[in-house]
Amino acid sequence: MFSDAWPLAVLAVLLAWPVPVFLARAAWPRRHARAAIALWQAVGIAGGLSLIGAPLAVGVAPLDKHLRTGLVELWRDAFHLRVPASLGLAQEVALALAAVLTVRLVGVTLLSAFRIERDLRRQRDAVDLAAEHADRQLRVLEHAAPAAYCLPGTRPRIVITEGTIAALAPDELEAVLAHERAHAKWRHELVVQPFVAWESALPLPPARRATASVTALVEMLADDHAARSAGRPALARALVAIGGTAGPVPNQRADDGSGAARSTPGTPTLDRVQRLVKPPGGAALAERVMGPAAWLAAILLVAGPTWYVLR
């Protein structure tokens, strides 16, 4: 009866707690940021599908021993407005649970995306009114505190303060701007948004770890882009001088009130500086293969449950 349900339930539990905790503590994502983000996304997708699929499998078990064919039978009865006679109270409760989980996960994701885009639009409009327009995207605020951040979206804005311009050398300023342009160009907020929604839907420590980890990883992706155009030393000096830039999704990070996080020990900003000053070469073989291994694991995480359900 539960031949399809229990593997999905076990996978959902693993992907909801121990796997995110283990992945958040790992050191290799700093070297393979893009692969690590793909793995985090696969964890989220496979975890959500397994979480919904497990009660679905329980609910349709009396109709067929496989989830896919059981869902087909359930859909046929629902289309004709019939409740299958073979379903008992336990199956009805399981189906109701699956429906609630689906509505919550999808609803929270859509609502989170709407709220974030609304807040970004308001911030872009406010910056357009208050700041000097340096070019089509760049806005300069009259403020002595150094800060630099991106307001992403279809009409992105890159915001810096006069304090940032005064605090940085030309190559350092170019590195900061290149970092923020990477956020705007590659729409990094779209990478972070699903994890923000996951944290809202399931407010558990692993979800918070996932959001923090993915936010840090997209900052590292932008660092890599800036380092290629302006150099790693210049970006490292800029991070030390003004602190970390704001992430691509608003209100997801603590700051000092100026919009830029400070480089205190143990913070993501310090990790980014150490990553920039450490030579990229010379890694052990085990660490070098972690990137391809992460891509493979991400593919298997999504393809495995999909095959299991559709087989």
Image: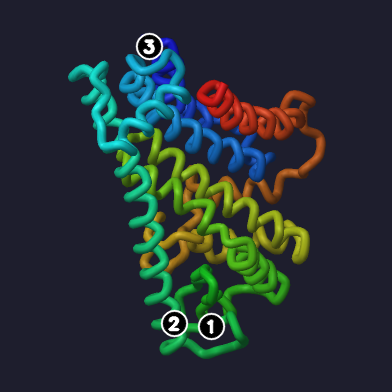
Q: Secondary structure at mark 1?
A: strand
Residue depth check, mark 3 versus mark 2: number of the one nearer the observer: 3
The image quarter containing residue 306 is top right
Q: Secondary structure at mark 3?
A: loop
In the depicted view, which residue is nearer to us: 230 or 104?
104
Q: Residue furthest right?
A: 282
In the depicted structure, whether residue 301 falls above or below residue 193 = above
Q: Amino acid at mark 2?
A: Val
Q: Secondary structure at mark 2?
A: helix
Q: Upstream in the sequence, badge 3 or badge 2?
A: 3
Marks 1 and 2: CB-CB under 8 Å?
yes
> At x 44% / y 82%, what residue is drawn?
127
Measured as percent of width and height from the top left, residue 304 is found at 58, 24
Note whether residue 51 is visible: yes
**Which labelled disc corresponds to residue 127?**
2
Question: Distance between the Cα atoms at labels 1 and 3?
Answer: 58 Å
Question: Distance between the Cα atoms at labels 1 and 2?
Answer: 7 Å
- Circle 3 residue: 2
Residue depth check, mark 1 versus mark 3: number of the one nearer the observer: 3
- Circle 1 residue: 139
> At x 49% / y 52%, what residue is drawn?
192
**Which labelled disc corresponds to residue 35?**
none
> At x 50% / y 73%, what residue is drawn?
146
Q: Amino acid at mark 1?
A: Arg
In the depicted structure, whether residue 13 falls above or below residue 246 = above
Measured as percent of width and height from the top left, residue 131 is found at 47, 87
The 10 Å Cα crowd at callout 1, few under 14, some 14 to 19, many 20 or more, is: many
In the depicted view, which residue is nearer to us: 220 or 58?
58
- Quadrant containing the C terminus in the rendered view: top right
